[in-house]
Image: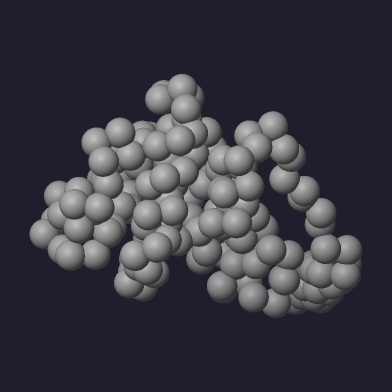
Amino acid sequence: MISHPAAIAITMGLVRPRIVLSTGLMKLLTDDELTAVIYHEMYHKENHDPLKNFLISLCSSTLWYIPILKWFNQKYRIFKELLADEFAIEKQATSLNLGSALLKMLKVGKQEKILFAHASFADTSVNYRIKYLLNPFSEIQLRIPVRVAFLSILVFSFICTLFMYALVYA
């Protein structure tokens, strides 16, 4: 628990993740909604999502010349949020509490930008999450962008060729 007026619910920490909730969140949500948020964050904690998010973001930003990694980073975060939502829904046997908590947090506004590795409740993939909450049986379309994938393969092949050339003629 931290004393802060904004509604904050995050899981942070690379090696030993911890769930951080703010007093602003406690004032905003009902007990059932808060329980749903805690279940959501417990999923992130148990799966070490802050570390995974950090590593994927690191790869995506340092290997910026392979554009498919940016796309993969975005899709990975969306799916992790949907899996955390699913975990919370299973634990409570209803999507009502999670949905109302998400809507309340969206109403009060955007969270402050946090500069360290974390997994946050209300700052990622909101449209997908609301769609999932309304219809848990709908499938998320995972269409790989062909142009970006082709460009990534070309860049990767070029880099491999350079390395092979360097190994042979060095």
Relative image position of residue 137 (x, y in whole percent): 69, 32
Relative image position of residue 52 (x, y in whole percent): 48, 50
Identify the residue at image location x=20%, y=48%.
26
Q: Is residue 51 visible?
A: no
Relative image position of residue 119 (x, y in whole percent): 40, 53
Q: Is residue 21 above or below residue 85?
A: below
Name the image quarter holding residue 106.
bottom left
Q: Is residue 71 above or below residue 65?
A: above
- 115 with respect to 90 (left or right): left
Q: Is residue 64 above or below residue 78?
A: below
Identify the residue at image location x=81%, y=69%.
148
- 33 with respect to 20 (left or right): right
Q: Quadrant of the C terminus?
A: bottom right
Identify the residue at image location x=74%, y=39%.
139
Q: Is residue 135 visible?
A: yes
Relative image position of residue 21 (x, y in whole percent): 23, 50
